[in-house]
Image (spheres, rainbow, N blue to C red):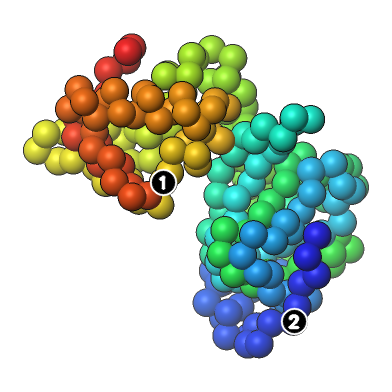
Amino acid sequence: MPAPTQSGNPEGLIVQLKPQLRPLAVRGAVRSYKKNSVIINEGDVGESLFVLLQGRVKVYATDDTGREITYGTIDTGDYFGEMSLDGGPRSASVITLEPCVCSVVTRNSVREHLVAQPDFAMDLVTQVIRRARSATETARQMALLDVYGRVISTLENEEGPGRPEAPVLLQQITHQSIASRVGASREMVSRLLKDLEKGGYLALGVKKITLLRKLPARW
């Protein structure tokens, strides 16, 4: 894992956080990470929670062959790593999608924060439940939907289906990122998207897809 570096102006970044997160962030050590730095490795023992002060990260897992499944992304002002504060192994890996700054809060500091700010416990529980539900939905789709079904679910879950009078533009999305989300090859996803484009359902661009009308349930 690349070594983190000290951040230049952590106070300014912490001030921009939601009020309920600021007291937690000030308890941590602020670190900067370059783009494509793996902050958390799946299977490692968890000792810290990360408050994302700047940047965006991807949460993912890989199998023994290197095949990747993406669980989602986390943006500035949120936190991650809370799932293993019980001292268990990390359930997923986290990599930076751009240069990032995090406040790294140890498990003991999180406990101290919960004693000082008991209302934050509900926020933490809500976060764990929300992400557990997201992981459950991902597992459900992998088990019950075919590749095409998972692709259209991924596209339409972003902003909803497109309509002729109100097309939906999805940005910063690639064939590979969709493939990682649905557990399929990039080639298969590309074939499906090109077929849908030929059918007039969507328009493909560079790192963007425009949904022109509701995608068919089957293809």
Residue 6 is marked as 2
Horizontal arrangement in the rendering, residue 80 relative to residue 105 (left or right)? left
- Near mark 2 (Cα within 10 A), the count class, few <14, some 14-19 or many ≥20, is few
Tell me if 95 is positioned left or right of 218 in this view: right
Mark 2 is on which residue type?
Answer: Gln
Q: Check disc 1 and give the amino acid type.
A: Ile
How far apart are labels 2 and 1 at the CA level?
A: 31 Å
The quadrant of the rendering that contains the N terminus is: bottom right
The quarter of the rendered structure image containing the C terminus is top left
Q: Specify the farthest residue to the left.
A: 165
**Quadrant position of residue 90:** top right
Residue 23's quadrant in the figure?
bottom right
- Left or right of 147? Residue 22 is right
Q: Nearer the viewer, residue 216 or 197?
A: 197
Residue at disc 2, secondary structure: strand
Q: Which residue is mark 1?
A: 173
Against 76, is 32 above or below? below
Residue shown at 18% from the left, 40% from the top: 167
Q: Quadrant of residue 37?
A: bottom right
Residue sitting at x 89%, y 48% = 45
Image disc number at residue 147: none
Q: Please report the residue visible at 53 percent of the width from the left and 20 percent of the height from the top.
A: 141
Q: Position of residue 47 (x, y in %)?
A: 87, 56
Q: Is residue 210 visible?
A: yes
Helix, strand or loop at disc 1? Answer: loop
- Is residue 215 toward the left or the right of residue 39 in the image? left
Q: Nearer the viewer, residue 55 or 47?
A: 55
Question: In the rendering, at what x and y percent does residue 46 appear?
Answer: 85, 51
Lower sequence index among marks 2 and 1: 2
